[in-house]
Image (cartoon, rainbow, N blue to C red):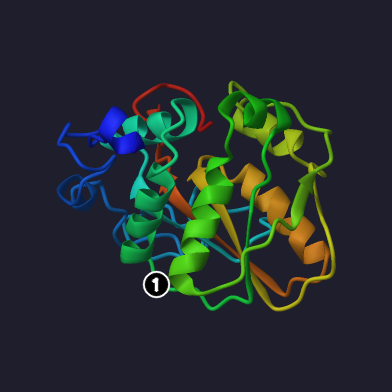
Amino acid sequence: MLDLVLPQRCLVCGAGGTQLCDDCALALPALRPPLCERCGAPTAWPVRRCRECSGRRLGFATARAAVAYEGDVRRIVAGWKERGLRRLADAAAAVVADRLPAPHAALITFIPPDRDRRLRRGHHPAARLAEALADRWQLPCEPRLVRTGGSTRQRGLSLAERRRNVVGAFRADGALAGTVLLVDDVYTSGATVSAAASALRAAGARRVDVVTFTRAIYVPGVGLQGRRKEPI
């Protein structure tokens, strides 16, 4: 009934029927090898640690994203997170499942919502993405992380400030074991998922792998997405 009143249209091309059509999903900018073995950043050749993550103590074992955060992907993420287009979570999960291998994990969890943004948006994109991926990969999905309330918003902070801001920002509920898959919508500097992964490991997880729909690409000397600034 809702589709009769508010017909669905592809956010990229405007075609009717769905919020992201199959053709536009296939055309989204892929993150293809070579990639950093640890954080998943595009590299000139295969490396275990890239310039972006070398020298950092990361809480996760690996991080992978399905698409680069550029062009039409930015429009999709904005519609999904800020305009309340919740069905894009299922479309994003389809892209992730198509482009990334199924994980060897005992449990899927996700970055918990910031209370103010959850109230403003009325939904939590990372949770919906995690639930959709759990359905596709036939894995349990549980909200195991909570925010301690000690951090502020990451937007507008420098890379170093981002890392300091999320130290101790999460706590894991309940005992964990084996490999946990941590899901978020966007990987930017990696500070948030690293802090959350550390909390999961402190609760007993043997390994934490990170999966996101998209990833910001940092170009040395240029910055994030063509702006002269550090990654956000």
Give 222 or 119, whichever is nearer the viewer.
Answer: 119
The residue at 43%/40% (across/down) is: 216
The residue at 19%/52% (across/down) is: 22
Residue 11, image x, y percentages: 26, 33
Q: Is residue 114 left or right of residue 230?
A: right
Compared with 49, 20 (above or below) is above
Give 118 or 197, whichever is nearer the viewer.
Answer: 118
Q: Is residue 22 left or right of residue 161?
A: left
Q: Residue furthest front?
A: 1
The residue at 78%/47% (across/down) is: 146
Residue 2, image x, y percentages: 35, 35
Quadrant of the image occupied by residue 94: bottom left
Q: Is residue 125 left or right of residue 205?
A: left
Residue 40, image x, y percentages: 45, 57
Question: Residue tagged by mark 1?
Answer: 101
Q: Amino acid at mark 1?
A: Pro
Residue 176, image x, y percentages: 78, 71
Quadrant of the image occupied by residue 202: bottom right
Q: Is residue 28 left or right of residue 79?
A: left
